[in-house]
Image (cartoon, grey):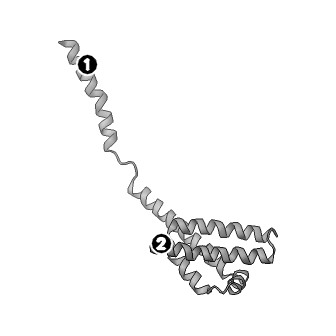
Amino acid sequence: MGIRLLVFSLSLLLLIPATLAAQTQAVTPSQLQEAMRGAAKTQEKNRNDVQEFFSSEVARKALKAGKIDYQRVQSGVATLSPEELARLAARTNQFKQDFAGGALNGQQTTYAIIALATAVFVLIIVAAH
């Protein structure tokens, strides 16, 4: 009988820390708030990067050549989800690097900008359905 009581007591002692650990918060409210602030800053940076890209003289000329309204592109950028915006920002930043490095000629630049603007419209259409 004494051994059973000892085993039972030890079992309870082993279970108590597990239940206490399950009751503690994995993320504190301040950590959650900081994460939300970081996500908002990232989203704002991405939106600024994309809008700056489409505002550039090179992009405006390319959009004009493709008969794409600059204002519609900018309006469309404002409606993108954070994930879509992050992907588009990555592509526009990569394009800016390629362009600055001389990896693209004028025609390639125009086509790339038109493709990126078209991607904005496609994302909007897909999101609407």
Task: Look at mark 1 in the image and give the residue it sits on.
Answer: 7
Helix, strand or loop at mark 2? helix
- Tell me the residue at 38%/57% (across/down): 29
Where residue 20 appears, as percent x and y from the top left, is: 30, 39
Mark 1 neighbour density, 10 Å: few (under 14) some (14–19) many (20 or more): few
Q: Which of marks 2 and 1 is nearer the N terminus?
A: 1
Position of 5 with respect to 98 (left or right) is left
Q: Nearer the viewer, residue 79 or 38?
A: 79
Q: Which of 60 and 115 is in front in this view?
A: 115
| 23 over 40 or under it: above or below | above
Where residue 116 appears, as percent x and y from the top left, is: 64, 73
Q: Residue furthest left?
A: 1
Task: Look at mark 2 in the image and give the residue it sits on.
Answer: 127
Q: Which of 127 and 87 is in front in this view?
A: 127
Position of 104 with respect to 67 (left or right) is right
Q: In which quarter of the image is the C terminus?
A: bottom left
- Asked whether the residues under the numbered discs 2 and 1 touch, taking CB atoms below 8 Å apart as contact, a structural biologist would say no
- Tell me the residue at 47%/72% (across/down): 127
Instruction: Determine which of the numbered discs, if any, sits on residue 55 in the image.
Output: none
Asked where in the image residue 64 lies, by quadrant, the reply is bottom right
Count the numbered circles shown: 2
Where residue 81 appears, as percent x and y from the top left, is: 50, 69
Position of 14 with respect to 41 (left or right) is left
Asked where in the image residue 122 lies, by quadrant, the reply is bottom right
| 69 over 48 or under it: above or below | below
Where residue 52 appears, as percent x and y from the top left, is: 64, 78
- Tell me the residue at 51%/67% (across/down): 82
Helix, strand or loop at mark 1? helix
- Tell me the residue at 77%/74% (across/down): 108
| Amino acid on which disc 1 is placed | Val
| Amino acid on which disc 2 is placed | Ala
**Front label number (2 vs 1):** 2
